[in-house]
Amino acid sequence: MTLLSLSPLDGRYREKVLQLPEYFSEAALMKYRITIEVEFFIALSLEPNIKEVRKFTKNEINSLRNLYLNFSQKDAEKIKTIEKTTNHDVKAVEYFIKEKLSKTSLKKYCEFIHFACTSEDINNLSYALMLKDGIKNVILPAMGKIHQDLLKKSKAWKKISILARTHGQPATPTTLGKEFFVFAKRLERQINQLKKQEYLGKFNGATGTFAAHHIAYPEVNWVRFSTRFIKSLKLTPNPLTTQIEPHDFQAEIYHNIIRFNTICTDLSRDIWLYISRNCFSQKLKEGEVGSSTMPHKVNPIDFENAEGNLGLANTLLTHLAGTLPISRLQRDLTDSTVQRNIGSALGYSLLAYTSLLKGLGKLKVNRKVLKKDLDENLEVLAEALQTVMRRYGIEKPYEKLKKLTRGKRITRQDLNSFIDSLALPKPEKLRLKKLTPATYTGLAEKLVV
């Protein structure tokens, strides 16, 4: 029962992360392990110097690949049953495959399943494929939806002037579109880096020396074999390792996602503040309740949920990135238990992306509020005036505007009287008198491209 789940990802939020178990569940890990074992078995049959394994027929290869292509819940349960005896998850997968082959034409070659391998030869490639597939098929598309939504809003809102706030105080106006475009470009950079990420793998035995391989078949070029095999999985070979692939590439991935998530946190907090200032209202959904006691409330819960889950995700991702690249001497098991939480880290990320996207879809711009905010803060034009004064050589322009505006609310009459007192060309005075906070946005509109 999901109501008895220890993790909310498998309980309350299960429906929102349903795409991930296909890649990051224990059953998925079994499937990826079978993939590696089977493809290695096939590769051995194609190596001419290994004469004890004949070349498999096309039908035999198809039957072998069906072990992972048609992997079922029943198969996963069978492996768990075997593991109760072996107390070793990778060995259970090996025995499962051997049992499947025991009644086939390949029975006599069963001892070449897991030949010369250490568990990490199988595991590191499984996790690399798992990450590559899960990020490509689930995480990147979810990131892309946020990016595309921000781009769309940037272009739709690029002409809408808003009062900027630095240190929480009124500052030089900008446009809503330009501010959203800043976030879109920040996220775009992280997405592009993640798309270019290499996924590394090793296949070199118990301590990375090919010792077992070489002692059995010294005539085989095992470095070349390993490189070719890893490339066939569309992974990047890492030829020099200890027993484990050192996981540096995984740390790169997690740090990349951490940065993306941090930017999303920044976005969520900014929108929360815009909503609190009534710059945005939120579309209402029939039947929803904002407060158990205050009927009027429409809380920015999507952005709050996003922020909370981004924090959980980044905490887990930070631990993954900081722990996995460290292994005592040639190997310890710390990485094994930690890697089982990759799905949780990405699950909280996906949950946050879903909430953020939902919140973005509810936003409605309150143009009247934005206009009122601009009209009530004429003092932000002090920057414009003192900069033009500098152009025309008027002494101490900053100090004069500071005296007029610092910590004060000024009127249009105050501003015009000040402009009239300046030794400026008449056309320049007229231009400055026409200037409003709403039109003092520089090139903000043109920056959204």
Image (spheres, helix red, strand yellow):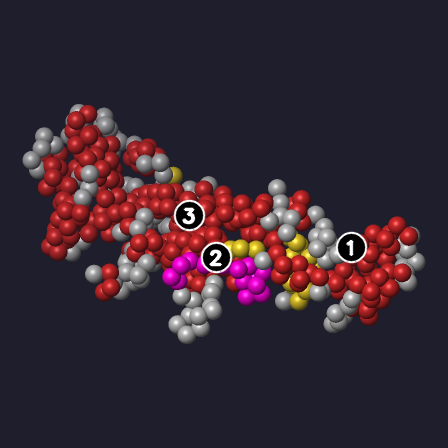
Dividing the image into 4 quarters, which one contains the C terminus? Answer: top right
Magenta segment includes 134? no
Q: Is residue 427 left or right of residue 240?
A: right
Q: Residue furthest left?
A: 103
| Residue 217's disc number | none
* SS of the residue under disc 3: helix
Towards the viewer: 417 or 314: 417
Q: Residue at 32% across / 36% down in the picture?
A: 233
Q: Nearer the viewer, mark 3 or mark 2?
A: 2
| Quarter of the picture holding the N terminus | bottom left
**Given the image, on which type of amino acid does mark 3 rest?**
Ala
Q: Nearer the viewer, mark 1 or mark 3?
A: 1
- Secondary element at tag 1: loop
Residue lying farthest to the bottom in this orientation: 293
The disc label shown at residue 283, or none: 2
x, y (%) of residue 375?
A: 71, 61
Q: From the viewer's perspective, tell me whether residue 48 is left or right of residue 370.
A: left
Find disc 1 in the rendering and name its residue. Answer: 435
Mark 3 or mark 2: which comes first in sequence? Answer: 3
Which of 196 and 433 lies nearest the eye of the viewer? 433
Taking the magenta stretch, the answer to whether it contains residue 279 is yes
The disc at residue 142 is 3
Percent x, y of residue 156: 58, 46
Q: Position of residue 404 (x, y in %)?
A: 81, 69
Q: CA distance from mark 2 to mark 1?
A: 34 Å
Residue 80 in view in this figure: yes
- Crowding around mark 2 (Cα neighbors within 10 Å: few <14, some 14 to 19, many 20+) is few
Q: Residue at x 84, y 61 (%)?
A: 416
106 up-or-down from 92: above or below = above
Residue type at the position of mark 1: Leu
Front residue of 403/188: it is: 403
